[in-house]
Amino acid sequence: MKKLTLILALFLASLVQAQAQKISGGIKAGLNTTTWSGDAVQSFSEALNSTGALKKEFKTGYHVGGYMNIPLGYNFSLEPGLYYSTKGMTVEQTFSQNSFLKVRADITNESHYLDLPVLAKVTLGHGFQLFAGPQVSYLVANKVRGEAGILGFTLEQDVDWDSGLREFDFGLTGGLGYQFINGVQLNVAYDHGLTTLDAGKSNFDVYNRALKLSVGYTFR
């Protein structure tokens, strides 16, 4: 909690300084399509402790937050931001003894992060923008949902589980955007985690991967 408070305090202080310097800022929100890369499928398979057809699926989430835009030169700027973002993955496993009795089990991991990207942004002209930079993510909470279905019945259970995950995730992010004259912008970005999510207690290496579609508005 102390780390989270420090992160928020630093970002708010930056916003105050930006306002004093007349630096522009804005808000942004959108959808995440996320998964884990690495031996995540094997780890979930061991958790299910069963045999059968195993399929990894993308998980849909969201992000919302704000950013500052600091001009550094002609068509070039620095854009730090702070976003609340959900990530994770889903594994579906189906196994059956015969064509009549079929059991399906799904496990979804949903991680809640505070993302702090620092982007270098280049304006190409006619509103198009390219951006890329490092990103630090702080794990706020992590939930695991298990669902099992058989003969048309479905059982669900949610568990809070974050003791086996690192608090901080370091990665790279980048993408393409378009900003209209009125300040509205559309963006597509990709997050590539570089730090394994395992805190060393479970001995598995997995990394966050996310495709993000967002709509934003830059205040003038």
Image (tube, rainbow, N blue to C red):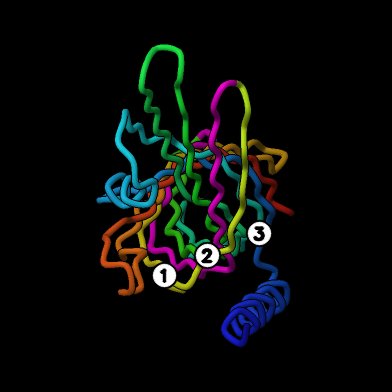
Question: Does the magenta portion include 157?
Answer: no
Up the image or down, 140 lies above or below 157; here it is below
Q: Which mark is residue 5?
A: none
* Residue 170: quadrant of the picture: bottom left
What residue would you read off at disc 3? Answer: 66
Up the image or down, 153 lies above or below 59; here it is above
Please tell me which of labels 2 and 3 falls first in the chain: 3
The foreground one among 41 and 146 is: 146
The kind of secondary structure element at disc 1 is loop
What residue would you read off at disc 2? Answer: 161
* Residue 27 horizontal/vertical position (percent): 69, 53
Query: For the residues marked 1 and 2, what is the alpha-carbon distance in whole angstroms?
Result: 7 Å
* Residue 141 horizontal/vertical position (percent): 58, 65
Q: What amino acid is found at the position of numbered circle 1 in the picture?
A: Gly
SS assignment for the magenta stretch, majority: strand
The foreground one among 101 and 126 is: 101
Give the left or right position of residue 95, taking residue 153 as reference: left
Mark 3 or 1: the one toward you: 1
Query: For the residues marked 3 and 1, what is the alpha-carbon distance in whole angstroms?
Result: 29 Å
Q: What amino acid is found at the position of numbered circle 3 in the picture?
A: Gly
Mark 2 or 3: the one toward you: 2
Query: For the residues marked 2 and 3, what is the alpha-carbon distance in whole angstroms?
Result: 28 Å
The kind of secondary structure element at disc 3 is strand
Please state the extent of the stretch shown in magenta in the rendering.
Answer: 126-151
